[in-house]
Amino acid sequence: MLALDHIIIAASSPEQAAHNFSERHRIKVAQGGQHANWGTYNYLAYFENDCYIEWIGITDWTVAKESDNPLIQLLVRKLSNGVEGPVQYALRTERMDDCIENLKTLDTPYTGPFPGSRKRPDGRLLEWRMLFPASAEDVLPFLIEWGEVKNKPSDSSLINNREIHSLTANISDSATFASF
């Protein structure tokens, strides 16, 4: 089964973008961490239905530009062109290998899975895998499978007392892309 995992927002300043969103929608945001292998960092807003919003920016342009991860390539393209806002979303699976076999059976091209990790503010290592179905026309949602530690805050008071219910087809306006 697939479920909405998170929405990715490109931001030149993830901290400021998350703060602005927090003020506008009265939600709590938290510092996520750095992805040293990708030259990126993030801020997060967690919701009750195990979904979150991720504001992601670049700390090291050289590392980010050299990444083979399609999400980081997309982020570099968007931010290089001055585009900030929602750019992608992820669907969660607990059976990545089955998803890979299904894509092969359907003869659907894909890249990955790409391993990912970062240290959480509490020091624990968060690990995941990402799989990107390919399309010549559109950016498709990618699949994510979490390791032993799930992406939930160690302080449960950081989970907003709301749920993400839907996404709009046009996510170009960061204020209206999701309904709570």
Image (cartoon, rainbow, N blue to C red):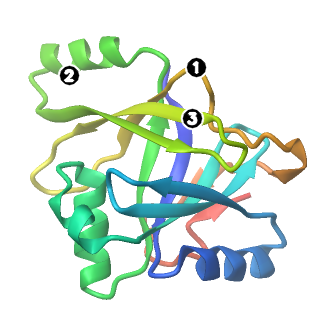
Asked if residue 15 lies left or right of residue 97, the reply is right
Query: Could one spot residue 161 in this view of the protein?
Result: no
Q: How many marks?
A: 3
Q: Is residue 100 above or below residue 10?
A: above
Quarter of the image where one finds residue 106: top left
Q: Nearer the viewer, residue 175 or 60?
A: 60
Q: Amino acid at mark 1?
A: Glu
Tell me the residue that label 1 is attached to.
148
Where is residue 178? Give x, y as percent.
Answer: 61, 61
- Give x and y (percent) for residue 125: 57, 35
Q: Residue at x 21, y 56 (%)?
A: 138
For the residues labelled 1 and 3, the Cα–Cα distance comes to 10 Å
Q: Nearer the viewer, residue 20 or 153?
A: 153
Other residues around mark 1 within 10 Å, as few (<14) / some (14–19) / many (≥20): few
Q: Along the polypeptide, which appears first: circle 3 or circle 2?
A: 2
Spot occupied by residue 93 in the image (x, y as percentages of width and height): 47, 24
- Three-letter code, disc 2: Leu
| Residue at 81% in and 66% down | 27
Please determine whether, in this image, residue 38 is positioned above or below residue 79. Answer: above
- Type of amino acid under label 3: Leu
The kind of secondary structure element at disc 3 is: strand
Q: Quadrant of residue 12?
A: bottom left
Per the image, label 2 sits on a secondary structure element best described as helix
For marks 1 and 2, the one nearer the N-term is 2
- What is the distance, in whole Å, between disc 3 and disc 2 at their CAs? 29 Å
**Marks 1 and 3: CB-CB under 8 Å?**
no
Q: Residue furthest bottom?
A: 82
From the viewer's perspective, is the residue at label 1 or at label 2 nearer? Answer: 1
Mark 2 surroundings: few (<14), some (14-19) or many (≥20) residues within 10 A: some
Q: Which residue is mark 2?
A: 103
Residue position for label 3: 125
- Measured in 3D between alpha carbons, the distance from the residue under mark 1 to the one under mark 2, in whole angstroms, is 25 Å
